[in-house]
Amino acid sequence: MDEERLDGQLSRLKCGYRKAIEKAMERVPVRNGVIALRDLHLETSLPMDLLAEILKEDGLRLPPQVERVDLNSSRTNRRKKDGRRRK
């Protein structure tokens, strides 16, 4: 019985996170129809792994101007002072 209750709580939490992500997608920058995972993270303060998990599930509504969310955008393309890319 406790397991069923925990599953219900988890389901409600994910539903709330999904709604928060949908609202955040209306406020973050969209570049060529793509939203960066990092931008969603900065807007919602949700952990990137949780964002990615929820984005992979069905049932998320994308705004009309959004074609997809780039889940690999957590990497930065900064350069070291000597001009070489960081790993």
Image (spheres, grey):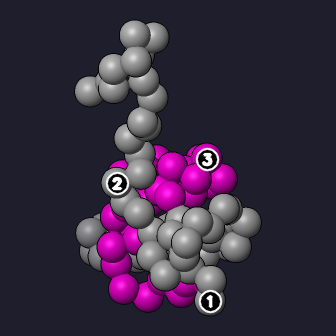
Local crowd size for mark 3, using a 10 Å CA cut-off: few (<14), some (14–19), many (≥20): few
Q: Which mark is residue 38?
A: none
Task: Find the magenta span and give its range.
Answer: 36-63
Q: Position of residue 79 (x, y in %)?
A: 42, 23
Q: Earlier in the sequence, mark 2 or mark 1?
A: 1
Quote the CA–CA distance across marks 2 and 1: 22 Å
**Residue type pointed to by label 2:** Asn
Q: Position of residue 33 (x, y in %)?
A: 54, 76
Which residue, given by chain and number where applicable, does mark 1 sit on?
64
Whether residue 22 is visible? yes
Q: Could you tell me what secondary structure mostly forms the magenta stretch?
A: helix
Q: Position of residue 60 (x, y in %)?
A: 48, 83
Which residue, given by chain and number where applicable, does mark 2 sit on?
72
Magenta stretch encompasses residue 4? no
* Res. 71 image quadrant: bottom left
Which residue, given by chain and number where applicable, does mark 3 sit on?
42
Q: Secondary structure at mark 2?
A: loop
Name above or below for residue 82 compared with residue 40.
above
Q: Position of residue 15 (x, y in %)?
A: 51, 76
Q: Residue at x 51, y 49 (%)?
A: 38
Q: Earlier in the sequence, mark 3 or mark 1?
A: 3
